[in-house]
Image: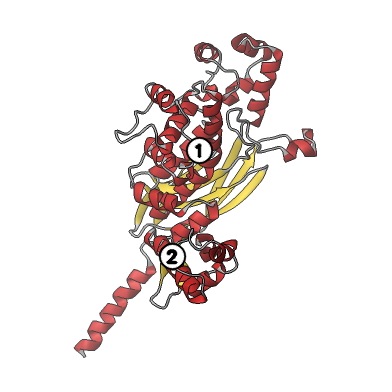
Amino acid sequence: FNSEIVTKTIGSMQDAVDYVTWTFLYRRLTKNPNYYNLQGTSNVHLSEHLSEMVETVLGDLEESKCCQMTDEGDVSPLNLGMIAAYYYIQYTTIELIASSVTAKTKTRGVMEILSASSEFASLPIRHGEEKALRILSRNVTHKLPQSAQFHDSNTKALVLLQCHFSRTALSTDLRNDQKMILGESLPLIQAVVDVISSNGWLKPALAAMELSQMIVQGLWNKDHVLKQIPHFTKDIIDRCDAYEGEEPIESVFDILTLDDDVRNNLLRLPDDKMADVAVFCNNYPNVDISFEVQDADEVTAGDPVTMLVKLEREIDEEEMDEEEISQLGVVSAPLFPKEKREGWWIVVGDTKTNTLLSLKRISLQTTQKVTVEFLAPEEAGDYDLTLFCMSDSYLGCDQEYSIPLSVAVGESDDDDDDDDESDVESDAQ
């Protein structure tokens, strides 16, 4: 019912009962009453059964804070319900996310919350897999929680996620299960980001965004950024680190700027693998970001602040045909099971207080302009806010900029003081 409540199809308990009467379930009730624990098939029995079922379901949704009900039986959606409906995830998952994330949650915590989602409860545990999972768990980067049980699907999801980041070899069945987990993970992470932003926490939101990059590229966030390039082994990365040219090789962009002979000597790859490297490096986003705070000299405490942000991909459009331009934003991710397009989170926050002030998620092909709005701090003074531009697909291309903001005393405070003084004067008279 959650999606129907969000779309206003269901606005009351009676609407929910009416909605069920149009489903196949309603037809089955009279055909197989014993299966559904009906006492009879009369209209009275059906009505009582439907009313009880609807009341139970709506009660569960209300308890998980997805909707709220009035004494008259009217139903309206809440923030968590809207997030669950938008990303098409189960209400039990959104309840788990909301109750688990805190202001101090790090990447590891987000990964454990993600793996505990109800969406993974259907993962099969085949004969002999418990032993295989136990063996795999001995070499994972983060130890499993003490409560972990290897016959539990959510434990399996946590182990396979860590195997993905460590690029551990798996059996065919486990590899297929891992692909299912990865395909389901991105909408869940986006829901986690939205729940965290609703609470106004900055660092946990950034940690969830990094987890999205890790899932798409199959790496830990502490791994070398060059490792996401296809066919880049530890030996190649070591040679790049040891390179003593004019500029050190620290990012994907540095690989592109090398002379051909230098690059060939460092990589030592055959032509077909070098072509894969070229495709990845050319797809890797090189984005220029500019921003401007509107009326920056007139910002007052507690008032809305508007900021214009412009993202522009650095490309030579004159040398590209229409098909190449249409393919801009397609992510090079050999280890991710689905085709994916780039997404970006534009975040404004205060790193000193761990406060997230504004968040927007956008897509980018060539150019994108975004209007970001947030409330100025309640107290007057000079603030150093930060603008983050976070990719959801690549490691090493995130950007952050300092936003100096001078906040003046709000006029409303002065007005209130004047009103108070006038009231005192009138009382004295």
The amino acid at mark 1 is Ser
The residue lying at 28 percent from left, 82 percent from top is 422
Q: Residue at x 63, y 22 (%)?
A: 256
Say which of 356 and 378 sits in front: 356
Disc 2 to disc 1, how far (Cα)? 32 Å
- Looking at the rendered structure, the kind of residue marked 2 is Leu
Residue depicted at x 61% and y 50%: 369
Please identify the residue farthest to the bottom as the structure is shown: 429
Element type at mark 1: helix
In the rendered image, the vertical position of residue 84 relative to residue 23, given as above or below: above
2 or 1: tag closer to the N-terminus: 2
Please state the horizontal and vertical placement of residue 355, each as a whole percent of the image.
37, 49
Q: Residue 188 at what x, y percent from top left?
A: 49, 45
Q: Is residue 12 visible?
A: no
Residue located 52% across and 47% down the image: 346
Residue contact at pointers 2 and 1, CB within 8 angstroms: no
Which class describes the residues within 10 Å of circle 2: few (<14), some (14-19), or many (20+)?
many
Q: Please tell me whether residue 336 is drawn above or below residue 414 in the rendered image.
A: above
For numbered disc 2, what is the local secondary structure? helix
Of 391 and 377, the residue lying toward us:
391
> In the shown orientation, is residue 147 left or right of residue 218?
left
Residue 206, image x, y percentages: 44, 41
Q: Label 2 belongs to which residue?
A: 58
Q: Dot 1: within a 10 Å radius of its alpha carbon, few (fewer than 14), some, or many (20 or more) residues? A: many
Q: As rendered, which of 429 and 201 lies closer to the eye?
A: 201
Question: What residue sits right under mark 1 in the picture?
Answer: 212
Q: Nearer the viewer, residue 298 or 387?
A: 387
Vertical position of residue 272 compared to residue 216: above or below: above
Looking at this view, name the residue that lies furthest to the left.
Answer: 428
From what the image shows, is residue 203 above or below residue 427?
above
Q: Is residue 22 at all visible to an observer of this figure?
A: yes
